[in-house]
Amino acid sequence: MGRLYDRYSSIVYSIALRVLGDTGAAEDVLQEVFLQLWRNPGVFDSSRGNMAAWLAVIARNRAIDSLRKRRPEADIADVVVSVEPDLAGDTERARAMEKIRSVLGDMPAAQRSALEMAYFEGLTHTEISARTGEPLGTVKTRIRAGLLSLRKAFA
Amino acid sequence: MNVHEQFAEDLGLYALGTLQGEERVALERHLEECASCHRELEQLRGDMALLALSTAGPTPPLRARQRLMDAVARESRAHRVPARRWWWAAVPWVVAAALALAAVVFWRQGDRQARRIAELQSESAQQQDQLQRAREIVETLTATDAMRVTLVAAKTPPQPQGKAIYVRDRSSLIFLASNMPALPTQKAYELWLIPPKGAPVPAGVFKPDARGGATVINPPLPTRVEAKAFAITVEPEQGSLSPTMPIVMMGAGE
C-alpha cells in the first residue's frame, strides 16, 4: 500500500484539490480512495486498464460527490477506463501532462470553459446553459468535443 | 442520425456523472446491449483521466501518508475482511454477542457454566485465527503489487499457464495466468466456464500485463453452476457471449 501511495498519491490529491479547492477536503478524498483500494484490492482489475488513469477518474468522481454533497457511487469496480498513452511511469505522465495542457491552451475559450464547468465543478449541461445563456445542445456538443480533443492529441 | 450518434453526446455527460432523469435511463438501457457505446464510454473515461492529469503538481502533505498508514494499521488490528465476504465479518460479532449473552446467563448458574465460557472463548480465539488466515490468503491472491512466479522443471521454455480455483456453492472464481502471449490492441482473452451440459458461460475478460500475467477475481457468474472444465479463447476487447474458436487453452478439474 505504501508503494502504491508513493507512486499515485500526487495524482489523486491534485485532482481532488483542484475540484475542492481546500487542502483538508482533498486529503479526505485521498484517504478515502486509498483506504477503499486497500480494503478491497480486487476492485481494480489490472487487466482492464491503467491504474494511474483509473485512480484519476475515481478521485475526480469522489471529489465531485463531496463538492456536490452527493452520496458516493457504491460500485467503483464497474468503472473501466481505457486510455491510449502509457501513464505508468513519471516520465510518460509528465510528457502526457505537457501535451494535455497545450491542448487545453489551444481550445476555444467557450469550449474549455464548458468542459471545465462540467469536469471540475460537476455542473450539469442544464446548469451550464443557465450560467452561460447558451442552448443546451451547444453545451452538450462543447463538452463532448472538448473531451475528444484530448484523445485526438494522443492518436 | 444512427442510434450511436444519438447517444454520443449523452455518453460524454454520462461519463462525467451529470446525465440525469430519462436520458440517463435510456442511455443505461442502450449501454447494456451496445458494446461499441460501452467501449466509447471507457474511452471517454480515459479522456477524463487525461484531463485530471492536467492538474498534476501538488503533492499531499506528509501527514496524509501517516494518516493513511495509521488507518490501515487500525483496520488490520480489527481483523478486516474484504467487503464481499461480509458473512466472515459477521462471525466475530456473532461470537461476541453470543459470549455476552452466555456471560449473563452463566454468571447466574455458577462454576460449571464458567468453564463453558472459557471453552467458548477458546473457540472464539480459534475462529479469529481462522479468519485471520483466510484474510491473509485472499489479500495475497488479490494484491495489486503481488509478485507472481510460475515454477517449472529446469530448462523448460516458459509456457502459457492458467490456474482456475472455483467454488461452486459460492459462485466464487479466482483465475491466475502467466506467460500469456500479448494480443493485438482490439483483442482480449476471455475465460469460459464449461458446464457438463449447455453453452459455455463467460467468466471474465482479461488482458495480460507486460510480463504475460493476469488475474480474474470473482467475475459475475450464474448461481451454483457446475463446471466440467475451463477454457480460454481470444475475443474482441469487450468480450463475447459465446466463444470464438479456436480454444487457446483448456483444463478440466483435477
Image (tube, rainbow, N blue to C red):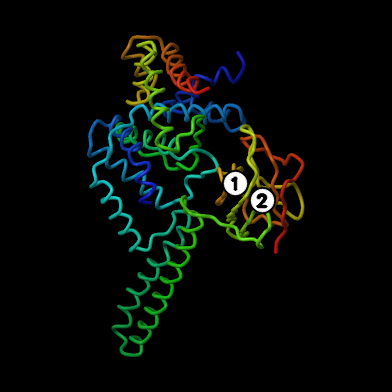
- Under tag 2, what secondary structure? loop
The extreme bottom residue here reads B111
Residue at image point 41% right, 32% down? A93
Question: Residue B57, located in which quarter of the rendered image?
Answer: top left
Q: Amino acid at mark 1?
A: Gly
Taking the spot 42% from the left edge, 61% from the top edge, the residue there is B89
Instruction: Tell me whether circle 2 and circle 1 mark residues in contact (CB < 8 Å).
Output: yes
User: In the image, residue B205 lies at what x, y percent?
Assistant: 61, 42
Q: Looking at the image, is B15 positioned above or below residue A113?
A: below
Query: From mark 2 to mark 1, how far is it between C-alphas?
Result: 8 Å
Disc nearer the start of the sequence (2/1): 2
Residue in the foreground of this view, choosing between B34 and A130: B34
Subunit of label 1 = B
| Horizontal arrangement in the rendering, residue B73 relative to residue B172 (left or right) | left
Please give the chain letter of the residue carrying mark 2: B
Q: Which residue is mark 1?
A: B212
Q: Which part of the image, by quadrant, shows the C terminus of chain B?
A: bottom right
In the picture, residue A63 is in which quadrant? top left
Residue at figure coordinates x 53%, y 26% from the top left: B27
**Residue under pointer 2:** B160
The image position of residue B17, as x and y in percent, is: 42, 29
Q: Dot 2: few (<14), some (14–19), or many (≥20) neighbours within 10 Å?
A: some
Answer left or right for A65 relative to B88: left
Q: Position of residue A71 (x, y in %)?
A: 35, 39
Q: Amino acid at mark 2?
A: Pro
